[in-house]
Image (spheres, rainbow, N blue to C red):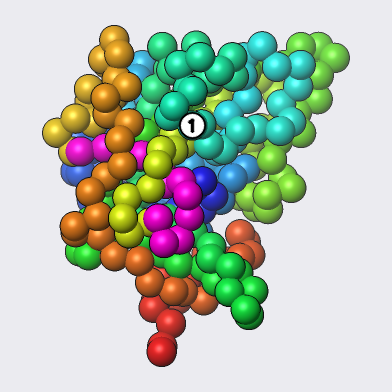
Amino acid sequence: MCGRYTLMVEPAALEDRFDARIADSGVNTPRYNMAPGQQLPVITSDEPETIRRLEWGLVPSWADDDSGGLINARAESVAEKPSFREAYERRRCLVPADGFYEWVETEAGKQPYRVAFEDDRVFALAGLWERWEPSEKTTQTGLDSFGGGLEDAPEDDGPLETFTIVTTAPNELVSDLHHRMAVILEPEREREWLTADDPQALLEPYPADEMRAYPVSKAVNDPSTDEPSLVEPLES
């Protein structure tokens, strides 16, 4: 799965990388511990020239309430599963990142690792997004249990826009850490993910050749901690 990720670039560099403008004043980077329940930058299929914030944890449009947002969607079933089927057909998004965390069981407990390209370059994860409208009897609950933080909380009224990250089988590097990995899109095919009639061929493991994985501080376990030290390799 993908449960945390990083985006360490400044806003201007983010705009240049995706040839899109930041239209939401709440978009703030660098970030070192992006977590479910937070409002995070994405580029949606209906506004491909805009970077805006959606809440991480997809709530289907037909859901009775906004609890239990889905942070990941399996590539193998995303076209059929009711929670994701309509979004896969009509509402895809790019999720900017430059690394993600995985946890490995050790004798001393779970050890977090950061997975990134060797040059820490920015990439896009394949995502899906949804818009959920509360009824008059519905109260939004969000994903506060994930510790998203008050500054990232959505408004309590109006539509709730959410996203999920698509996962696939791991490449040779990630397979040592976890049995799933987030789908990293080839830069030249990012716009294809937003527009293609059938983008299933894009949902393959990204080659491990230029990637690295290294252990980091367990301070990343706390989603309210967001500081540069989180991405520093642990000393051996």
Q: For residue 157, say whether it is visible.
A: yes
In this rendering, the answer to whether 228 lies above or below 164 is: below
Residue nearest the viewer, comparing 207 with 41: 207
- What residue is at 24 percent from the left and 55 percent from the top? 208
Q: Tell me the quadrant of the picture where the C terminus can be found.
A: bottom left
- Residue 167, placed above or below residue 192: below
The magenta region covers 175-186
Residue 88 located left or right of residue 191 = right
Which image quadrant for residue 204?
top left
Residue 151 pos. (x, y %) = 61, 49
Residue 49: in sight, yes or no? no
Q: Nearer the viewer, residue 87 or 131?
A: 87
**Where is mark 1, residue-wise?**
74
Tell which of 171 and 93 is nearer to you. Answer: 171
Horizontal relation, residue 184 to residue 57: left or right:
left
The residue sitting at 14% across, 33% down in the picture is 188
Q: Position of residue 56 (x, y in %)?
A: 55, 38
User: Residue 180: within the magenta?
Assistant: yes
- Residue at the image position 49 percent from the left and 23 percent from the top: 77
Please say whether residue 195 is one of the residues in the magenta stretch.
no
Q: Determine which quarter of the picture holds residue 154.
A: top right
Q: In the figure, is residue 16 to the left or right of 41?
A: left
